[in-house]
Amino acid sequence: MTVKPERHVLLVFPHPDDESFSSAGLVRMYRNMGVPVTYACLTLGEMGRNLGNPPFATRESLPEIRRKELLKACEAMGIEDLRMMGFRDKTIEFEDDEKMVKLVQDLIDELNPSLIITFLPNYCVHPDHEATARAVVEAVRRMPKNERPVVYGVGFATNTVAEKGEPDVVIDITEVKEDKLKALQAHDSQTAWMIEENQKRIDEGQPMSDSWFHYEKFYTIRFDDEE
């Protein structure tokens, strides 16, 4: 699929590294085109399970480590407008739904994005992911049809393809795969073991044509009142 210029792209994810796994390649491509990108990261992922192996972080030090990792990842992607929204990890699901919808509405009112990238409701596994996706979709649903941005949802639950079919948006990110790798490496406290596993597969000669570093896939979220 050809990547076309957008007016403004808004990412809304709950945790540092959500953006790098899901859309770092596409973001880098937009930035290379001069498209402004804003990333609203709701938490610092301070409850992340990985503290390093051997451990180099504690539960107390992890938030600052992940904040610095997020800044480094945004640099790799070319994101200059990073919003750290200040929520606590693993609490988004308990926030008032209207409060979260209002947060997204305010971002949309300020930025007037033509594309929003977030998680796909009901297919994104983590309760904070689901709460984030729910807020984004509801905020856009309330807009007049002719003013709504396009919304790309990232779905990765095991039943996603079986129930939703294949993603309708498939982006070849091969040209920026090194930038995506740098973004993932920036989140070293959480991603080091995954990158090592991926490299091991490559070294063993396993086919990687559909890996993180070749394609990014999204579902265009449709609304009930749209044809």
Image (cartoon, helix red, strand yellow):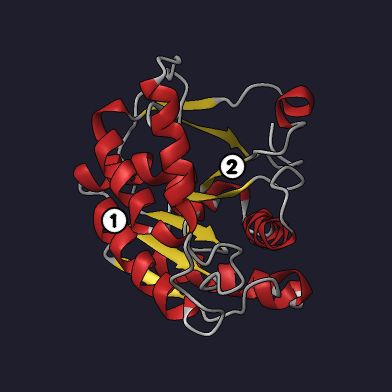
| Quadrant in the picture for residue 71 | bottom left
The N terminus sits in image quarter: top left
Q: Nearer the viewer, residue 129 or 139?
A: 129
SS at circle 2: strand
At x 55%, y 71%, the residue is: 42
The C terminus sits in image quarter: top right
Among all residues in the image, which is located at the extreme front? 54
- Residue 48 location (% of width, % of height): 58, 66
Residue beneath label 1, please?
36
Evaluate whether residue 1 shows in this view: no
* Disc ID at residue 154: 2
How packed mark 2 is, by other alpha carbons closer than 10 Å (few <14, some 14-19, many 20 or more), is many
At x 31%, y 60%, the residue is: 74
- Residue 157 location (% of width, % of height): 71, 38
User: Does 81 sit left or right of 142 as displayed?
Assistant: left
- Residue 165 location (% of width, % of height): 70, 22
User: Does 1 sit left or right of 76 as displayed?
Assistant: right
Q: Amino acid at mark 2?
A: Val
Vertical arrangement, residue 170 with respect to residue 89, above or below: above
Q: Amino acid at mark 1?
A: Pro
* Disc ID at residue 168: none
Evaluate whether residue 209 shows in this view: yes
- Residue 52 location (% of width, % of height): 48, 63
At x 62%, y 56%, the residue is: 140
| Quadrant in the picture for residue 49 | bottom right
